[in-house]
Image (tube, grey):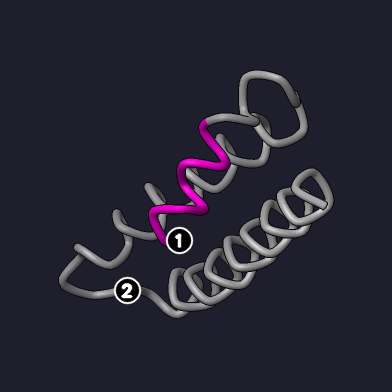
Amino acid sequence: MDTTTLEQIAALQRSDPRIESLVERHTSLEERIQMLLHRDHLTPSETIELARLKKEKLSVKDEIESLLHVKSA
């Protein structure tokens, strides 16, 4: 996310529990993704999990940005 988006999120996060929850989910997904990426080898199920996590993280990001767009309009 770009700096402007991060600033908007920080400003709205305290006032909108949905955004706060989504940001927390995005962060936890990123942590799990990074954990998997730092492994030397992934099992087939971990490879599938990694793909699923990346898709979910992108979906959460899109939802955050959608909420930001609605709030700024």
Residue 62 located left or right of residue 70 = left
Label 2 and label 1: CA atoms lie apart by 27 Å
Task: Please check the rendered image and state whether residue 51 is part of the magenta-colored stretch, yes or no.
Answer: no
Q: For the residue carrying disc 2, how many other residues have a C-alpha within 10 Å: few (<14), some (14-19), or many (20+)?
A: some
Q: Nearer the viewer, residue 36 or 54?
A: 54
Which range of residues does the magenta coloring cover? 1-10
Disc 2 marks which residue? 42
Residue 18's image quarter? Answer: top right
Residue 20's image quarter? Answer: top right
**For the residue labelled by badge 2, is the local secondary structure a helix, a strand or a loop?**
loop
Residue 9, labelled with which disc?
none
Main SS of residues in magenta: helix
Residue 16 located left or right of residue 14 = right
- Which of pointers 2 and 1 lies earlier in the amino acid sequence? 1
For image coordinates 76% across by 56% down, the residue present is 69
Horizontal and vertical percent position of residue 12: 65, 31
Q: Nearer the viewer, mark 2 or mark 1?
A: 1
Q: Which three-letter amino acid code belongs to the residue tagged 1?
A: Met
For the residues labelled 2 and 1, say whether their Cβ atoms are less than 8 Å apart.
no
Residue 8's image quarter? Answer: top right
For image coordinates 32% across by 62% down, the residue present is 36
Q: For the residue carrying disc 1, how many other residues have a C-alpha within 10 Å: few (<14), some (14-19), or many (20+)?
A: few
| As drawn, 19 above or below 43 | above
Disc 1 marks which residue? 1
Name the image quarter holding the N terminus.
Answer: bottom left
Task: Please check the rendered image and state whether residue 7 is part of the magenta-colored stretch, yes or no.
Answer: yes
Horizontal and vertical percent position of residue 48: 54, 76
